[in-house]
Amino acid sequence: MKIPTLTRVRGCVLIAVRGEHVEYFINALAENGVPVWDIEPKNGNLAEMKVLLRDFHALRPLLKRTGCRVHVQGRIGLPFTLVKLYKRKFFMVGIVLFFVLLFLLSSMVWNVRVTGNEKIATEDVLEAAKKEGVRPFQWIFRLDSPDKLSRELSIRLPGTSWIGVERKGTTITIQIVEAAEPPKQPLTDPRHLVSRTDAVVTSIYAEQGRPLVEKNSRVKKGQVLISGILGVDGGNTQVVVAKGEVKGLVWHEYRLAVPLVQKHKVYTGERKTKSYFVIGDRAVQLWGYGKDPYQASETLTEHDPLTWRSLKLPVGWMTEKVMEVQESKETLTVEEAKKQGLDGAVRDILAKYGTDSQIISQKILHEKKENGKVYMKVLFEVEEKIAEELPIVHNQGE
C-alpha cells in the first residue's frame, strides 16, 4: 500500500497481528480504507505492519470479525515524543530557560575596553562612552552604529585625532588615536658626530660644530666627522651640540639563494564555519558538522568568552573558519631569479639604512645554479648617511 504523507508528524504504530485469518484482516483493512504499509509476514499466523495512530482504534471491530489479536511493537512520531517530553516537562523547561538566559546574557554589553590612550585618562573615555549609552549591562540592540558612536565620542573627547568603536561578542573596544604631539626639542647635551662604519665621504654639511674630514676622505668606524668642541688646543674652547649631515660610500656584501620553483599559497574564497559553545575547557559543537570538504585548508580560531569587567567568565563562544587553500607553483628563469634576489637585497638595504640611500653600483662576485636554486654573492656600493651621535664626556678632548 502507498505510505501516507507526514507519518512522522501524524504518528504511527508498529503492530503485530496474530491469528489464523491474518490475510482476511489485511483485506478488511483495505475494504474499509484503513491505510497500512510495511507489511511483513513472519509466518502463517503472524504479520507486522504499520498503521496511523488515528486509525488504531478502528481496528477493534475488524479484529473481532477475523478472530485476530494485535500487539503494539513500537510507537513512532511526534505525538509520542510530545508525551515523553511532557512527562519530563521540568527538565525541558530548565533547558529552555537555560538557552533563554544564555541568549539574554549574550545580548548585553559585559565589558568596555579602552586601548591606545596615553595622555587621555581611561576614566574620562569611559565617562564619555557612558553618556552615549556604552556601558556594562546595556542591551546591544540599543546601541547606535559604531560609526555614529565614533563621531560622538570624537566630539566629547578633544585631543583625539581618531576614535574607533568595535563590538566583538559582549565586549566593546574603544580605540583611541591621540592627536600628534608637538615635535620634541632636539638633544641639547654636547655631542660629536662620528662615523658608524668604514666609508668614503661623498658629502659633508656641518650646521653646527667643526668638520674634521673632507669630501673623498676615507674614514673608519668611530672616527669623528663633525666635532662638538670649538676652538684650538690650549686656547679657549666651547662645547656645543654637533649638527649636520655626512654621507659616504659604504660596501655591503650579500649572499643570496633564490629557488627557481616557488610555491605560493592562495585562498580560493571557499570556507566552512564551525561554531562551538565553550564551558571551561570543553567545547560543544553547535553548527558546522561533517567532514571538511577541502583537500587543503587552513583553520582560523576565534575565541569570544563572556566577560564581566576585567573578569573572564568560564563560558563563551568559539568559531572555527576552515578556509580552502590551493598551492600554485611558479617556475622562474635564471635571470628572473637573479632579479628577484637583487631586488630583495635592495629593499633590505633601503629598510636598514634609510630610503634616501642610493645604490651606486652592484657587482655579482660569484654565481652558480645548484639543487634548483640560484646562488649569488653580490657586492653593493651604496651612498648613505654615515653619521651617528656620540656624547661628549666632561673634560674629553677630540
Image (cartoon, helix red, strand yellow):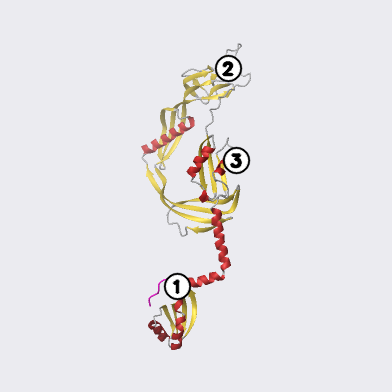
The residue beneath circle 2 is: 229
Local crowd at mark 3 within 10 Å, few (<14), some, or many (≥20)?
few
Local crowd at mark 1 within 10 Å, few (<14), some, or many (≥20)?
some
Tell me which amino acid carries mark 1: Arg
The quarter in which the N terminus is drawn is: bottom left
Which residue is situated farthest in the right direction here? 395
Residue 142 higher or lower than 286, as above or below? above
How far apart marks 2 and 3 lie (CA) works out to 50 Å
**Of the pair 25 and 132, the residue shown nearer to us:** 132
Residue 327 higher or lower than 250, as above or below? below
The residue beneath circle 3 is: 123
Which residue is situated farthest in the front direction here? 131
Local crowd at mark 2 within 10 Å, few (<14), some, or many (≥20)?
many
Residue 116 higher or lower than 396, as above or below? below
**Earlier sequence position, callout 2 versus callout 1:** 1
Tell me which amino acid carries mark 3: Glu
Q: Position of residue 141 (x, y in %)?
A: 51, 51
User: Disc 2 vs disc 1: which is toward the camera?
Assistant: 1
How far apart marks 2 and 1 lie (CA) works out to 102 Å
Asked if residue 222 lies in the magenta stretch, the reply is no
Tag 3 secondary structure: helix
The residue beneath circle 1 is: 10
Tell me which amino acid carries mark 2: Ile
Which segment is the magenta one? 1-10
**Earlier sequence position, callout 2 versus callout 3:** 3
The rendered magenta stretch, by its main secondary structure, is classed as: loop
User: Disc 2 vs disc 3: which is toward the camera?
Assistant: 3
